[in-house]
Amino acid sequence: MPLYETVFIARNDVTQQQVETVADEINTLLEADGGSIRKREYWGLRTLAYRIKKNRKGHYMLLGLDAQPATIKEIERQLSLNEDILRVLTLQVEEIDEAPSPVLSRKGEERGERGAGGGFRGPKPAGRFESGRGSAGRRNFDDREEFRARDERETVAEGEQG
């Protein structure tokens, strides 16, 4: 049977248990047609890139499916009818990777950094602002490029006169 990966996003006001229930419903549909869920990952409540149906966050779930194309169409239809589901994306894949997805592995790295080192992120990169966030409003006007250029012209003009 063909292999698929499906990611769906549920509304942020549903619980994780309700999201798991939706995945269980998909599993019962698959088993009725001889398919199965090979991989199941709950990615958590994440911020959306833009609002979807007035929601700013959503519960993400990844499913690795082994199913017939007709069953996949039925699953997508069922998910589109469910009011708690905001978006669904299904892709056909060559194989389902049993290792944790990059989303989960990156999430684990972020937790490790915050918990162990107290949030140290390394040296501050050289940037536009010397004293950190919000320092643009506190700079001297002499630091601005146009004032430096004017001052240089004045000093050159004084040097030619004197």
Image (tube, helix red, strand yellow):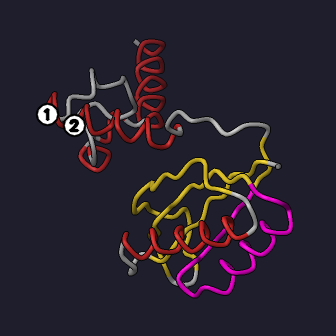
Which residue occupies the extreme right position in the image?
70
Percent position of residue 18, x then y: 42, 76
Q: Residue 89 lies in magenta, yes or no?
A: yes
Residue behind mark 1: 118
Amino acid type, label 2: Arg
Question: In front here: 135 or 132?
Answer: 132
Q: Is residue 13 left or right of residue 120?
A: right
Residue behind mark 2: 114
Which residue is at 55% across, 68% downward?
A: 9
Asked where in the image residue 52 lies, by quadrant, the reply is bottom right
Q: Is residue 73 left or right of residue 160?
A: right
Q: Height in image: 114 above or below 122?
A: below
Q: Height in image: 60 above or below 162?
A: below
Which range of residues does the magenta coloring cover? Answer: 67-90
Which residue is at 36% across, 23% downward?
A: 126
Percent position of residue 47, x then y: 44, 62
Amino acid type, label 1: Gly
Percent position of residue 119, x then y: 19, 35
Q: Are marks 1 and 2 in contact (CB under 8 Å)?
A: yes
Which residue is at 27% across, 22% downward?
A: 122
Q: Is residue 106 left or right of residue 114?
A: right
Q: Secondary structure at mark 1?
A: loop
Q: Residue 80 lies in magenta, yes or no?
A: yes
Which residue is at 53% across, 33% downward?
A: 99
